[in-house]
Amino acid sequence: MENMKMAIIGSGMMGRAIITGIIQNQIFNPETIFVSDVDPEKTKALHEELGVSTAISNTECVEGADIVLIAVKPQFLQPVLDELHGKINSESLIISIVAGVPIQRFVDGLGNQKIVRVMPNTPAQILEGMSGWFTSAEVSSDQKRLVEKILSGLGLAIYFDKESDLDQVAAVSGSGPAYVFLFMEAMIDTAVHMGFPRKIAEKLVIQTVRGSADYFERRGVHPAVLRNEVTSPGGTTAEALYYMEKEGLRHAVSSGMWACLNRTIELRENLPRQKGPTV
């Protein structure tokens, strides 16, 4: 985007992923992306690797910015809001990937109205992420299109009509990679127990998960249909699935996801609220 400046507060894993996606998809030129972080070594590394510009403070970073991405951990958010209250242009777009923090928190903390809340996940680091997003009413159509372009560069993105839907997104795709990794870990460890070298076990499981996901997407049918196609009556797969169901696999997944949703709501409702400085 010519003549536009993007400021990014925080250069952790997700902040870095978004920067990479923006540059690879040529949405912004690297030199128009300014990054600040409490760890100057991180911003220095990003400058050397990706060519982005760096700032010595958050205030310097957001000066004149058209878009401000806030990518800090929730426990570090309040000092950032206090520092930047009244410092960001009223027409600038604020994008937050801070987990579980509602839009109103940014309106109150920054004094800005144009806020986008995004719930990404970690595969965004290889541009295979899933992002759910929602905006305040003040965000313009052009700004929404720009957000869609940025998020689509990280994988897939879905806009939701209700902010509360992002709590469910957190429980499904936000934490979802951890569920998949746990299942993969269990399969790999069992394969090792059966006698396979760990590297072979990992290859068997990784390709099985990758191929199954792709196959599911291409077939476009209910997963039970695909499962039944693999399951012969009285066969080995039927025996395995019987024991998995008997041991409560389906119930464990459901219970875990609901617990994640409830914890997300609990943490959001218990967020410490401090007033930003008056200006």
Image (cartoon, rainbow, N blue to C red):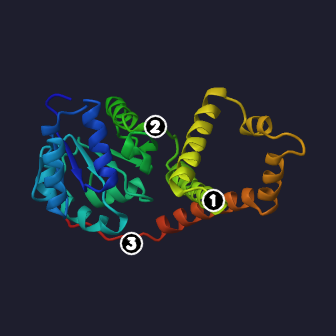
Front residue (pair 268, 236): 236
Q: Name the residue under label 1.
A: 195
Front residue (pair 105, 279): 105
Q: Is residue 222 left or right of residue 20?
A: right
Q: Name the residue under label 2.
A: 157
Residue under the point 66% across and 28% down: 220
- The kind of residue tagged 1 is Gly
Residue under the point 55% across and 66% down: 263
Q: Mark 3 points at which residue?
A: 272
Tell me the quarter of the image containing the C terminus: bottom left
Residue 107 location (% of width, % of height): 33, 54
- The kind of residue tagged 2 is Ala
Q: Are marks 2 and 3 in contact (CB under 8 Å)?
A: no
* Label 3 residue SS: loop
Residue under the point 19% across and 59% down: 37
Residue 271 location (% of width, % of height): 42, 69
The Cα atoms of the two marked residues, 2 and 3, are separated by 29 Å
Q: Using a 10 Å C-alpha cutoff, classify the residue at mark 2 as few (fewer than 14 neighbours), some (14 to 19) or many (20 or more).
A: many
N-term-proximal mark, 2 vs 3: 2
* Label 2 residue SS: strand
The Cα atoms of the two marked residues, 2 and 1, are separated by 41 Å
Residue under the point 60% across and 42% down: 208
